[in-house]
Amino acid sequence: MQIDIITVVPGLLEGPFSHSILKRAEEKGLAKVQVHNLRDYATNKQKQVDDYAFGGGAGMVMMIEPIAKCIEALKSERDYDEIIYMTPDGKTFDQQMANSLSLKGNLMILCGHYKGVDERIRQKYITREISIGDFVLSGGELAAAVVADAVIRLIPGVLNDETSALTDSFQDGLLAPPIYTRPAEYEGMKVPDILLSGHNEKIAHWRFEESVRRTKERRPDLLEGHDLEEGDKRK
Ligand code: ADE
């Protein structure tokens, strides 16, 4: 998978993809992220990428031409399954959306900045609009990094067994259970006996019960429509 990210602030995306799991994904040839500076596609001498909003009001609007030029240039190099626009008025990102995007081929992500992009870009090119939550960031870059991270780690082969995505919070619709490592006792606080028992079936059942307890306590909304009996059988 290749993820191409279009932005007016490429510096914001320099860090995240050259470390840890995302770096390894690229080294293994499983996922590559390329950042494109929209200003390189500006059509006038001033390298202008934004302009005043028709109808007035505060805030600039990202112009059509540089974005269209950049998208067309990328499309001429490879096929894209989705052209995504990061915006607070998009559909809220969740694990299910991450799962579905991880099964796609190449993705293009356009980061909104200023007041956002001219509506006609959305009409002509965008196949999916994503928000990472009900708050407003100063641009779509950090949101794009969040989406790319959540998607790339799900691509088969990116994670090794110890970090398997199958036991993540949300993957089975529940929050993850508590986890422990050595020492077995710290300042009088003991790891639950069951985890030291070596009895895999009982441990799986305990983890499931703890997941349910934690989800009921913290995110009861996740349990609506969740078949807990079915979940337990799968363990
Ligand atoms: N751009 C600004 N805020 C955003 C958000 N919450 N999600 C996605 N893109 C954004």
Image (tube, rainbow, N blue to C red):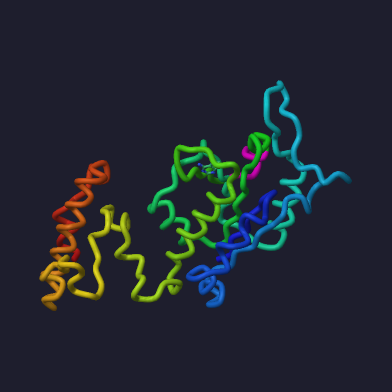
Which residue ends up furthest to the top in the rendered image? 55
Q: Quadrant of residue 159?
A: bottom left
Taking depth in this image into account, of 162 and 126 the one nearest to the observer is 162
> Does 23 lie within the magenta span?
no
Give the image location of residue 85, x and y in percent: 58, 45
Q: Which residues are magenta?
A: 121-126
Q: Quadrant of the C terminus?
A: bottom left
What residue is shown at x 53% (from left), y 49% (from top)?
A: 143
Q: Is residue 188 left or right of residue 144?
A: left
| Relative to 69, 150 lies left or right | left
* Residue in view at x 59 percent, y 60 percent: 3
Q: Quadrant of the N terminus?
A: bottom right
Q: Quadrant of residue 125?
A: top right
Residue that sits furthest to the right in the current view? 45
Q: Is residue 124 magenta?
A: yes
Which is the main secondary structure of the residues drawn in magenta? helix
Residue at image coords 57%, 48%: 84
Q: Residue 202: x percent and y percent?
A: 11, 69
The x and y percentages for residue 174 are 26, 53
Q: Residue at x 49, y 71 (%)?
A: 20
* Badge count: 0
Q: Nearer the viewer, residue 11 or 140?
A: 11
* Location of residue 173 in the rendering, given as x and y in whole percent from the top left corner: 28, 53
